[in-house]
Amino acid sequence: MTDTNGRRPGPRIVEVARAAGVSKSTVSRVINGSTYVSDRARQAVHLAIERLGYSPNHAARTLAGSKANAIALVVSEQGSRVLADPFFAGVLRGVHTELAGRRIQLLVMMSRQEDNDDLVAYLSGGHVDGALVLSLHGDDPLPRSLQARGMPVVVGGRPLVADDVPFVDADNFTGALQATRHLVSLGRRRIATIAGPRDMAVGMDRLSGWRRGVEEARRSADLLVHSDFTPDSGALAMEELLSRAPDLDAVFVAADIMALGALRVLRAGGRKVPEDVAVVGFDDSVLAATAVPPLTTVRQETETLGRTMTWRLLAELAGTEGLPPSVLLPTSMVFRASA
Amino acid sequence: MTDTNGRRPGPRIVEVARAAGVSKSTVSRVINGSTYVSDRARQAVHLAIERLGYSPNHAARTLAGSKANAIALVVSEQGSRVLADPFFAGVLRGVHTELAGRRIQLLVMMSRQEDNDDLVAYLSGGHVDGALVLSLHGDDPLPRSLQARGMPVVVGGRPLVADDVPFVDADNFTGALQATRHLVSLGRRRIATIAGPRDMAVGMDRLSGWRRGVEEARRSADLLVHSDFTPDSGALAMEELLSRAPDLDAVFVAADIMALGALRVLRAGGRKVPEDVAVVGFDDSVLAATAVPPLTTVRQETETLGRTMTWRLLAELAGTEGLPPSVLLPTSMVFRASA
DNA sequence: GAGAAGCCTGGGAGCGCTCCCAGGTTCTGG
DNA sequence: CCAGAACCTGGGAGCGCTCCCAGGCTTCTC
């Protein structure tokens, strides 16, 4: 992508300066929003930029300045196998929306456990100003390593063990609580749950919400099976629940994708949903609407998650004071046929 | 991300040079894989790099050199509403895999129709060496604009009208043909299709494959309804087909997500799948495995698509001769319960 | 009315690399 | 044995910006 002289096409800052009748320092000041620029100069510069179609060279700005004008979105690979696809796309869209209009590049990287060190070295080598880490298994060392090297980090999804890395997450606890209360309000008495794995905060938070919900309704909190966010494991879990408690009349499933497996088992067992067993899922993924029967579920806004993470990171980079260490995003129930 | 002097952390090329007892020119040659470096010097440099944990400054390389060491993955926003989620994540993973180990940054951008001009200006401003465009509606002007400015481009998904922008796509025609032949081999006589929209090549190619399939079996090719890649539109299409041909006994649906709507209508109408009506989908998305009944479908490898696009682009950047203008990736049938 | 305190501007020294140039050394072949 | 080619190396001029510094001009303030 070079012209015949081997140089990149397009005007340089000096050309803009010349066209506007000012020095390149002034053009730089206009671009970077400095005060101490007269209105006349500012307007002349804007006009010249417009006329020449000038776009500043990112590499030069980064090299000369003290910031990289780029942030990274890091996806931990293990996680992406499981939840990531629609989740990731939503988050990415949110990140992008929030970045729109600012001159900040988004680098997307996927981390494998084995080359974490390379990643940390690369990122803390000054190529980016901060990092967004999408870490779906809760004990990922990456965010801490990055932060230890002085890099601003925001994690998507609550880390399993509390540390001082700021995170943004859906309010999984409250979402699960709402779902359970809904089942209670339906008059269900034996309310089970298919929970996520113990090593993921998202699983534990949704489990806690369910537990709270059944306990406040004075129901038993022992109908619990852990599973791993796949349809088949959801099916297995449902079978186990059914054999342990043939009289159960409701299940809160910690993810839509597991709920599909559960629905299959219920159908095979001749139980009608929702008449015999009410089912509530979580995520409101595309799977929920097309399930048989369509799934009542808890909606989490993945796009808002991405936007909020980005907002938090940029605010930190801008030196904003008094930022909340972490943010929990509200969830909402989506009522369909299954409960 | 700066140290106390406002400079980025880590060693510079001169430090490596000093440590290795050579000049920075030689270090640069080693890094960039030039010939004309003695083995002794090369080894000394590698050792020094290792010891110091040196990682070259991307901005400086880009500024000084004639290439940007980065490629862009551009997603057209309209498309991403529809197909993109799992599709996009798969492609992204493929791109990333293919990029691994090369020092090439991946910039992800989403384009909205209205700011296409900005995007073209930005990209052709020398920030990237080439672009991967994921363009799901077939008449996107972006790839052509980019190519017209001299930027190497590879499109994912066949453009609707042939032009000379290279693309990589799944072999939708053959996939649909296989699916239709499978229905024929099952002894089905009235084989309908729910096709994608007319303005998407993916829709038209799958339609052509179906048409070929029914025609070579001397069946009628008039049971055709266009739809738009949503479950509801698939349901509507199925209703129309049923009212036009109550005796149909098979449907090829051009996307799993539409097939879910079709299955719903068939179920509501009391038709058994596959006994009364056999259904084949396309994509082998996560939806297919969890459908009721599980959907026989045509699998396309989104990850391979991403890898191939990237390979094609990098090969072009490297100046490889005799590259295929475009590549069609094979699809394969996945047999489940629905047909 | 004079000094201080803003406001606005241009000049120029880098940022950390790549790549060209010049020069030295070692291989070839006639 | 010597010219020329091939190999290897270091020096240094940029790449296109930002940001510091110095300085001129306008207001204020007492």
Image (tube, coloured by chain):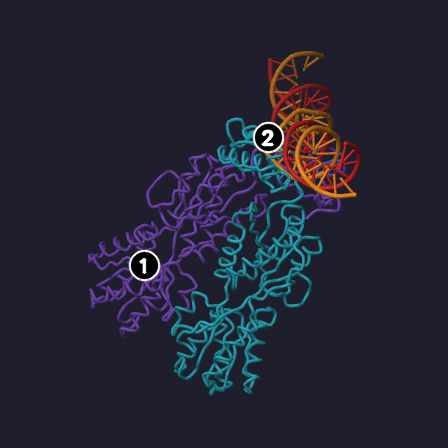
Chain colours: A cyan, B purple, C red, D orange
Q: Secondary structure at mark 2?
A: loop
Residue B283 badge = none
Q: Secondary structure at mark 1?
A: helix
Residue A291 x, y percent position in the rendering = 40, 71
Picture quadrant of residue B337:
bottom left
Q: For the point 33% across and 70% down, which residue is it?
A: B264
Q: For the point 55% across and 35% down, which residue is it?
A: A45
Q: Is residue B40 visible?
A: yes
- Depicted A193 relative to depicted B247: above or below: below
- Depicted B270 relative to depicted A20: above or below: below
Picture quadrant of residue A293:
bottom left
Chain of the residue that carries numbered disc 1 in the rendered image: B
Q: Nearer the viewer, residue B336 or A327?
A: A327
Q: Nearer the viewer, residue A328 or A39?
A: A39
Select label 2 or label 1 by which is in front: 2
Q: CA distance from mark 2 to mark 1?
A: 67 Å
Amino acid carrying label 1: it is Ala
Picture quadrant of residue A276:
bottom left
Residue B311 x, y percent position in the rendering = 49, 44
Residue A167 x, y percent position in the rendering = 62, 62
- Depicted B128 relative to depicted A106: above or below: above
Could you tell me which quadrant the C terminus of chain A lies in?
Answer: bottom left
Residue A338 x, y percent position in the rendering = 41, 77
Marks 2 & 1, CB-CB < 8 Å contact: no
Q: Nearer the viewer, residue B39 or B294?
A: B294
Amino acid carrying label 2: it is Val
Crowd around label 2: few <14 · some 14–19 · many ≥20 (10 Å): some
Residue B179 badge = 1
Residue under numbered circle 2: A22
